[in-house]
Image: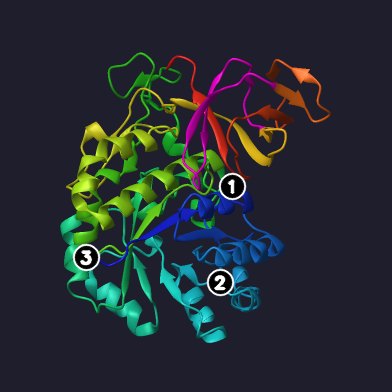
Amino acid sequence: MTKKIELLAPAGDLEKLKIAVLYGTDAVYLGGTSFGLRAKAKNFTEDDMREGVAFAHAHGVKVYVTCNIFAHNGDLAELPDYARFLKEIDVDAVLVADPGVFSIIRETVPDLDVHISTQANNTNYQTALFWQKLGAKRIVMARELSMQEIKGIHDNIPADLEIEAFVHGAMCISYSGRCLLSNYLTGRDANKGACSHPCRWEYFVTEKTRPGEYMPIVEDERGTFIFNSKDLCMIEYIPQLAEAGIYSLKIEGRIKTAYYVGTVVNAYRQAIDDYLKDPALYEKNKAKYLGLVSKASYRGFTTGFYFGKPSDKEQIYTTSSYIRTCDFVGMVLGYDEEKGLALVEQRNKFSVGDEIEFMCPADGFFTHKIDEIYTEDMQGVTDAPHPQQKLWVRVPKPVRAFDMMRREAAGNA
């Protein structure tokens, strides 16, 4: 019925790439150690990138690489060699915001697809047509656009020019993510990938003649997190996104955890597949999808600009903390079928007696009460207190590498 929708997931490092692929994404976006806008993510060495592209392609998943910094003169000299490397390892496209970077990539590797980043402030169809005439294959929408505006762009561009838009994750307070606050306050340039996220800090105002007196900006004795937006979540609006002409649904989060990536990707995978199979099935299951994404930490949810300009209800003024309903406690490394034991790497403390949900995208999720834990050399223990400790856990069903273990967070039981 509907044209296929691409699910696009963040990959902050090689482990997260593999998680995104195995949990159901159609494509991933990632950054190398240069030219991308998430310097705080671990990012990919050339060897990791080569391995990641091979892994993704072996599973039928595309790889897009970010080259979306706003380049200074000193950034340009190494760019041609980097572009040739990306072509050599067979990445599917690069994301670009800067016209100079775009020109160098097009001249150096003219047959490598280029997508125009949201940082380029793509807010109208003439801009989209401009970039297409220069050779761009996809335009990432500015986050400030409504569903109606995106539909207007779609209706005025050729069918082969794809539209991508963010549908889930943290919302930047600045226009299309072009923030100067971080650079001013900390010397870390958000537009070169080193944002310190001052939008999440607590703010007061002072009066010039009263130094040292701090007054909250709203009536709250704790101050206010004036720039702190709720997180975007559009999982309940897949039909509207598709009808607006958005082909690629993008999840934010290259500096988020592997657990976050797996949880959110799997939820959107189910939602998209159900919608494409039968819109009535999708409508029936919307509450389930929202429950699934809520098992990853979040700051409350908003629909951003999609249905009009956000109000004060889309901001959180009292805290910058996340809502967390589940704890990620372990990553499966392997399974011994003869013994019925899973080798896991601890990510948070868990103990004998804990009710654990195993997230198994290939075989379905299941819950199991832990009754046996052993060290690597098969010494019985009652809990797993040490970070990244490798342990054997009795599991009644076969599990696979990269299946994950979670339990209800304290206070939610």
Residue 185: horizontal and vertical position, in percent?
Answer: 51, 40
Q: CA distance from mark 3 to mark 1?
A: 41 Å
User: Where on the picture, by quarter, is residue 304?
Assistant: top left
- Residue behind mark 3: 1
Disc 2 from disc 1: Cα separation = 22 Å
| Quarter of the view holding residue 264 | top left
- At 60% from the left and 40% from the top, the residue drawn is 399
Q: Nearer the viewer, residue 120 or 391?
A: 391
Label 3, residues with CA under 10 Å away: few <14, some 14-19, many ≥20: few
Q: Quadrant of the C terminus?
A: top left
SS for callout 2 = loop
- Mark 3: secondary structure: loop
Verify whether residue 354 appears in magenta: yes
> Which of the numbered marks, if any, corresponds to residue 209?
none
Nearer the observer: mark 2 or 1; the answer is 2
Type of residue at label 1?
Answer: Lys
| Range of residues picked out in magenta | 346-372
Decide: is 387 above or below 137: above
Nearest to viewer (mark 3 / mark 1): 3
User: In this orientation, does residue 244 appear?
Assistant: yes
Q: Amino acid at mark 3?
A: Met
Q: Which residue is mark 2?
A: 91
Q: Is residue 10 above or below residue 108?
A: above
Helix, strand or loop at mark 1: loop
Residue placed under numbered mark 1 in the picture: 40
